[in-house]
């Protein structure tokens, strides 16, 4: 299996901050990396696919970058509704997810 | 709008079989270029893919669960199902069903999830 390492596991930030979450894979996955947002008690919601493509309806303050083994999710200006847990997921082989990054209010 | 809804017992005894069904509405399950999957999440923990099926019946399972998992599809009812045998407390999770896009390989529509607790 391809191992996924997300960092940080927890992040405290304020509204308006720029936030960056990283995901590293144990082997190269080209650009087959996706990002999901999950709020408490809800199913994950797709934000970014194939490393940098924004899913329809997702605000443009979300962006993704990277290829190979290193990927980044950036929120350019954190909004109150963005406090949630974020997961990366590789789709190069059988799907595996990162451990999650919980974005909390500072 | 496509909707998925999980149903099944919320409590299963150890060593027994967990059975869940996902009903798809607002669209057909018999559509090319999509697949249908199960993902689980233990309370307070991360996500684990269990397996996926195409409407044709072709299935793919997580190797770590393969010996205990069966996913099947019933196109006449627009449903797909999960069976997980010989469950233990470690299988206590919220179970999600989801649609997978065969081009981008993402899960783009999810059910709300259902908590299954394994306990005697």
Image (cartoon, coloured by chain):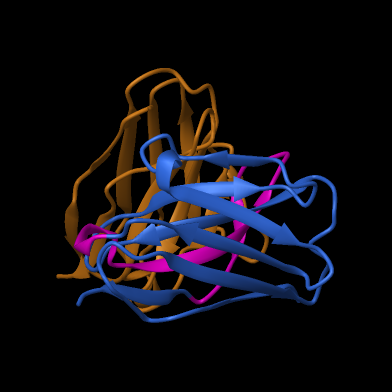
| Quarter of the image where one finds residue B87 | bottom left
Give the position of the N terminus of chain A as an image quadrant: top left
Range shown magenta: B88-112
Tell me which residue sits at (35%, 56%) in the image. Answer: A86
Does the magenta segment cover residue A62?
Answer: no
Determine whether A24 is above or below A41 in the image. Answer: above
Tell me which residue sits at (84%, 69%) in the image. Answer: B76
Count of numbered marks: 0
Determine whether A89 is above or below A84 in the image. Answer: above
- Left or right side of A72 for B92: left
Tell me which residue sits at (32%, 68%) in the image. Answer: A84
Q: Nearer the viewer, residue B14 or A97?
A: B14
| Quarter of the image where one finds residue A12 | bottom left
Expressed as whole percent of the image width and height from the top left, the position of residue B22 reads 61, 71
Chain A, colour shown: orange
Expressed as whole percent of the image width and height from the top left, the position of residue A89 reads 44, 43
Determine whether B104 is above or below B69 in the image. Answer: above
Give the position of the C terminus of chain A as an image quadrant: bottom left
Tell me which residue sits at (19%, 51%) in the image. Answer: A9
- Left or right side of B76 for B101: left
Q: Which chain is blue?
A: B
Does the magenta segment cover residue B92?
Answer: yes
- Left or right side of B58 for B10: left
Task: Kindly tell me whether residue A55 is visible in this rendering.
Answer: no
């Amino acid at each position: 299996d391809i191992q996924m390492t997300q960092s940080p596991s927890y992040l405290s930030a304020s509204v308006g901050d720029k936030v960056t979450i990283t995901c590293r894979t144990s082997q190269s996955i080209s650009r087959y990396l996706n990002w999901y947002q999950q709020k408490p008690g809800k199913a994950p919601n797709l934000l970014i696919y194939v490393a940098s493509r924004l899913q329809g309806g997702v605000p443009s303050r979300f962006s993704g970058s990277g290829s190979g083994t290193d990927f980044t999710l950036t929120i350019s200006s954190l909004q109150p509704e963005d406090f949630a847990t974020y997961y990366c997921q590789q789709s190069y082989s059988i799907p595996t997810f990162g451990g999650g990054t919980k974005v909390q209010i500072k | 709008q496509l909707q998925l809804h999980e149903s099944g017992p919320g409590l299963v005894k150890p060593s027994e079989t967990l059975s869940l069904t996902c009903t798809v509405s607002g669209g057909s399950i018999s559509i090319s270029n999509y697949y249908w999957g199960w993902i689980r999440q233990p309370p307070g923990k991360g996500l684990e893919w269990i397996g996926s099926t195409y409407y044709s019946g072709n299935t793919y399972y997580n190797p770590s669960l393969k010996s205990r998992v069966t996913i099947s599809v019933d196109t006449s009812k627009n449903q797909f199902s999960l069976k997980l045998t010989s469950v233990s407390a470690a299988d206590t999770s919220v179970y999600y069903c989801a649609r997978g896009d065969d081009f981008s390989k993402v899960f783009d529509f999810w059910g709300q999830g259902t908590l299954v607790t394994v306990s005697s």
